[in-house]
Image (cartoon, rainbow, N blue to C red):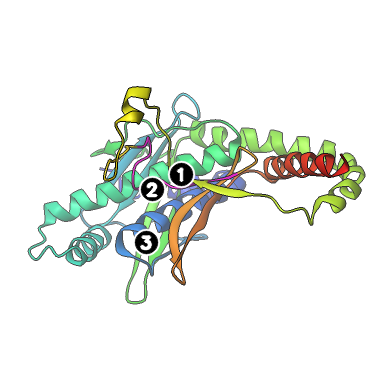
Amino acid sequence: MSNGGGANAAGSGDAGARSRIAGYCCDALVNALNGLTGAGFQVTMLDGAESEKMELPLIWKQPFSLAEGAILWLTAGKDLWESAGEMILGGAGVEAVTEEDCRSTWNEIAGQTMGGMAQAMTAELGREIQAQSGGGDTTGPGDREQSAVLEVRNSAQIWRVRISWTAEFAKGCTARVAQVEMAAAVAAPQESITSRTLDLLLDVALPVSVSFGKTSLQIRDVLKLNTGSVVELDRLVSEPVEVIVNNCVIARGEVVVVDGNYGVRVIHLASREDRLRSGMSEASSRLGMSAK
């Protein structure tokens, strides 16, 4: 089992890709932990931290559809996966929490983390990225893989986890971003031209709706609906809801309650260009109707 592999490779790897990948994982892991425990966790990358040998590490291996061979590993020691399992299961009322229960709970956290990373990459890279058939791994990453150390903390404890990834994963994460940045640089002069038009639209109100999911029903099933009927949607309870403006999904988030009212805490945002395009389309339509 490889417990220290990748520390040297990380130092020589691309700093931009390393920071970006660690950012994806930090955000996804803290969302998974806080989603299951309530709140209180923080996850950050430790610059220049050496990989430490972990006791009884659990290694999650996750291929992504970024590219052929794009794989990421998440490694946690017993101190973290046991503590997380006891907190989550204890909070759910389980009195006798076994080691196997904690392992299973951590695997659920790891799976949710990988799903969150896929969603973040989908939003930023502009194409659908999927986390494909991940699971526990007894071998771990090789010595040549790049890696980073993350610090996980709450008000009482501090733990460390390690992420490692293949060169194909790093390349897939950064290639599209470089294209987007180049396109933005080319379009920069045009932006100053359109800003005067945008200024005229900034005070226009736009309707915002939240989608919990959707489904299709045959007419006969619609006619059968009555008080107490349940319509199953295509979205899992754990999945984020969609924030929609002008029939365009501009963000995804989790439902919260604020002073007795429902709200949405934004987790992932669409690109600024997509949000601007949606807003200007709706605003221009309204201005045109007012002119008539």
Mark 3 or mark 1: name the one nearer the start of the chain: 3
In this view of the protein, can residue 70 be seen by the observer? yes
- Give the crowd class for mark 1: few <14, some 14-19, many >=20 residues within 10 Å: many
Callout 2 amino acid? Thr
Helix, strand or loop for disc 2:
helix
Residue 198: x %, y % from top left: 84, 48
Q: Which residue is mark 1?
A: 117
- The one nearer the camera, 35 or 56, is 35
Which span of residues is magenta-colored? Answer: 233-244
Please report the residue visible at 77 percent of the width from the left and 45 percent of the height from the top: 283
Position of 291 with respect to 119 (left or right) is right
Callout 1 amino acid? Met
Q: Which residue is mark 2?
A: 113
Callout 3 amino acid? Asn
| Cα gap from disc 1 to disc 2, whole angstroms | 6 Å
Residue 55 is labelled as none
In this view of the protein, can residue 218 be seen by the observer? no
Residue 233: x %, y % from top left: 36, 37
> Quarter-wise, where is residue 213 in the image?
top left
Helix, strand or loop for disc 1:
helix
| Cα gap from disc 3 to disc 1, whole angstroms | 15 Å
The answer to whether 229 is drawn above or below residue 127 in the figure is: below
Q: Residue furthest bottom?
A: 156
Residue 34 is labelled as 3
Position of 250 with respect to 191 (left or right) is left
